[in-house]
Amino acid sequence: MKAAVVHAFGAPLVIEDRPDPEPGPGQVRVRVEASGLCHTDIHAAHGDWPVRPNPPFVPGHEGVGLVEKLGEGVTHLSVGQRVAVPWLGRACGRCEHCLSGWETLCEQQVNTGYGCDGGYAEKMLAWADFAQPVPDGVSPFEAAPLTCAGVTTYKALKVAGVRPAQLVAISGIGGLGHLALQYAKIAGAQVAAIDVTDEKLELAAELGADLLIDARKDDVGKVLKAHGGAHAAIALAVNPAAFEAVNSGLRRGGKLVMVALPAHGTIQVPIFDTVLNGTSVIGSIVGTRQDLAEVFQLHAAGRTKVEYETRPLASVNDSIDEVLRGQVKARIVFDLGTGR
Ligand code: NAD
Ligand code: ZN
Ligand code: ZN
């Protein structure tokens, strides 16, 4: 089977032929049909974060495909069933976090495409308990971006506790942001969409944004304050200055939800304003299996639209460059199903 492999941080990925992986106990082998390119995969391939993966590794945590082989003890999935393999490859199931509905905080977790090989491949392994069945009628190309971009932003809005009639700022209308905007609308909020390219702002308008803010020329904080300030700001732009900009546009009691993970990212949080205004800064990491099930349910019910463009896996390095240059409308999804 073919896989795109990171051999050294910052070096181009190499397409290689590898033997089919054999599922161990509790695992399944998935014949990947579609695999989304999340900006996190670029951070992984560049070794951007304090905790780094160990090359060689196969990135990808938006892999969707058909179960091809069951490992020992797997009884609840069947061969031919479509599943998604998210970032949360497995968690321990026994710790405080796992037992309290916060499996995403489990210290024993293994992350797909980071701590184990991921979805940039024709075949991959998944722990059966964490492989999410994809509902009938949801295409693998739409399921792929929902598997990380969808679940992560759905969770971020839950964490922000967004209620109808609130003003929510979405900073960065990329893979994550175009779905964040839709979940904020579903929650009943007014949405301010912030980005730095005309195409992304046009996409935000198409998706129903109530207010468009062009961070190239507008003062984000001032525009948001002129509308009363944001009850919540979801920081999805890979740029610390963008976090500070939306933080300055919160209304009293507002919440900044940090989601993007720029390399060496730190921001200045003014103590006086934070205390006097009673604002919060919260981190949010992906979502649980239940969150992903809800994301798929919403999509199957026709409530969300996934904006994607397909590429062959062989174009992986060009695709990464396109994302870094901001040229992708929302999400690239590698097409592994047609032999291209
Ligand atoms: P993306 O590249 O598709 O989107 C980023 C968007 O930010 C682009 O539309 C870009 O034009 C816009 N942008 C750039 N500079 C900006 C600025 N100054 N102001 C406003 N917008 C600006 O990336 P993505 O796949 O959506 O991922 C975004 C980030 O989220 C990455 O850092 C990724 O690692 C992280 N991420 C975090 C989690 C989590 O669980 N916390 C999950 C997935 C991804
Ligand atoms: Zn991701
Ligand atoms: Zn745990």
Image (cartoon, rainbow, N blue to C red):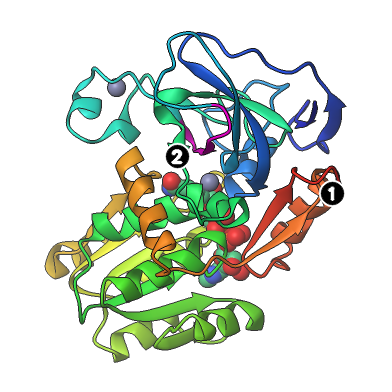
Magenta part of the chain: 79-88
Q: Label 1: which residue?
A: 315
User: Which residue corresponds to the image point at 19% horizontal and 24% vertical from the top-left?
Assistant: 96
Q: Which residue is outermost to the bottom?
A: 226
Residue 185 seen: yes
Residue 146's spot in the image, x, y percent? 49, 53
Residue 332 falls within the magenta-colored stretch: no
Q: Which-is-in-front pick, marks 2 and 1?
A: 2
Query: Vertical placement of 268 versus 291: above or below?
Result: below
Q: Nearer the viewer, residue 254 or 42?
A: 42
Determine which residue is flagged by label 2.
133
Q: Position of residue 72 (x, y in %)?
A: 49, 8
Residue drawn at point x = 49 percent, y = 58 percent: 240
As helix, strand or loop, the secondary structure at mark 1 comes to helix
In front of the other: 315 or 254: 315
N-term mark: 2 or 1: 2
Q: Residue at x 70, y 59 (%)?
A: 323
Relative horizontal placement of residue 1, taking residue 221 as reference (left or right): right
